[in-house]
Image (cartoon, rainbow, N blue to C red):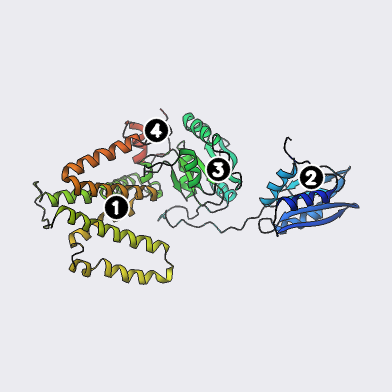
Amino acid sequence: MTGKTPFSAEAWKNVDWLRQATDCFDLTIRSVNVNDRQCLLVFVGGVTGTTSIEPIVESLVFDKGNLAFFPATVTQAGSLEDALDKILQGQTLVILEGSAYAFIVDTRSYPTRGPSEPTVEKSVRGARDGFIEHIMLDLGMVRRRIRDPKLVTKAYQKGSRTKTDIFVLYISDLIHPSILHDFQNRIDHLPVNAEVTSERQLCELMYGQTWNPYPHVRYTERPDIAAIHLLQGSLIILVDNCPSAVILPTTFFEQTKQIEEYTQTPVISLVMRAIRLAGVFCSIYLLPLWMVLVMQQNPTRLNLPLPEIPGPITFGVQVLIADLLIEWIRLSLIHSPLMLSSLLGIVAVFVLGDAPIAYGAYTQEILIMTAIVNIGNFVTAGYELSMANKIVRLALIVMVVIGGYRGFLIGILIHLILLLQTQVGPFPYLYPLIPFNGKEFKRLFLGNFTMDKK
């Protein structure tokens, strides 16, 4: 117990130490007499279930000189520093006068909301529950779906100040050994002074900050998706106070999948996957390809009716303006109160209507094409993937303006190299297409739950 402060046999000295160590107005001390011996209960209001304090007080008895607790989970506190950490988590410290030992009673009761369907990952069929900010309830929703004794759950606590609880879940006989080894190495080597307040911050600490826009992990707010990936050999990370889980590892094609593909027949699921992938690739390449055809006046056999353009730079600026306006409207709808949503709809009509076209800000063709590619962004199941694809599309537009069709081809080549160089865990980002794995490719597109680990 080097560097730790032991408990004093005088109970109030321990309380004085706790008061000096933290300046909390809601630090509560209750004194109870048990068989003519004073017993002090120390807890913090707001995160401690006060309704569970009374049964504990009523159950305090001495059994052959030992203090007994009947209706609670009890552990012995090793030092005053450890006890203070537990108190701030919502547990209750029980100190007995004349004893150099103290006990921690689990009375945590965090404010929380009920499980509800996630607004981002909606489904016509399937479960209607979703992860919330209570990590124990999130764990229970996963356990409810997988009742396998080989489901391993490990607990970590990271952050010198936040002391955030982190749960790691995997099925021992399904997970790829290299996935587990890579995660264990990264979580063990986190900086000592690093603070963890969200799942995104944890991922940045584990994988570092990079200019690569593509997500290295997949986030989900649905426990059924987390359970499916556990059965496929993935690793799930739950972070307290965060209503989403982290799935490791992930690939480009995994980011495009949605829960409805597991609730339909194989034929319908296959068709829906094909339509979704078509929308994903259109959101990246359709608008730059159309710009190349317009700038080259369609030197192909398609014979598409293409508009006249004033110049490559002006044409590119018009496309960027239209795309930027649609992005502004999307962001404003996300962050504006519901009472203003109707007003934003009216504003969107003026911004994307006939007035800007009449003033020459952009043409009808530009507006139609930008609307189509943004619909492709909305079709993309992974929100982080859709944002990365949008950044790639904007880069391709700039390269088309600068280099025409040569810039477009160079941009596609750079995009492909970026995807090939992105790797999380043992699998490349374009797996199972590159390198090709027939069994895994079949599972990906036909919706089987078994993962090929070869």
The amino acid on which the numbered mark 3 sits, given as a three-letter code, is Ala
Residue neighbourhood size for the residue with mark 4, other residues' Cα within 10 Å, grouped as few (<14), some (14–19), many (≥20): some
Label 1 crowding class (10 Å Cα cut-off): few <14, some 14-19, many 20+? many
Contact, mark 1 vs mark 3 (Cβ under 8 Å)? no
The percent position of residue 94, horizontal first and vertical second, equals: 78, 49
Mark closer to the chain start, 2 or 4? 2
Identify which amino acid the numbered label 1 is placed on.
Gly
> Where's residue 42, x and y in %?
76, 53
Residue 7 falls in image quadrant: top right
| Residue 310 visible, this orientation | yes
**C-alpha span from label 2 to label 1:** 60 Å
According to the image, label 3 marks what residue?
194
**Left or right placement of residue 407 versus residue 419 in this view:** left
Q: Earlier in the sequence, mark 3 or mark 2?
A: 2
Query: For the residue carrying disc 3, how many other residues have a C-alpha within 10 Å: few (<14), some (14-19), or many (20+)?
Result: some
Mark 4 near mark 3, Cβ–Cβ under 8 Å? Answer: no
The local secondary structure at tag 2 comes to strand
Nearest to N terminus: mark 4 or mark 3: 3
Secondary structure at numbered mark 4? strand
| Residue placed under numbered mark 1 in the picture | 376
Q: Looking at numbered disc 2 in the image, what kind of residue is underneath it?
A: Ala
Question: On the image, numbered disc 4 is attached to which residue?
Answer: 427
- For residue 298, side relative to residue 447 (left or right): left
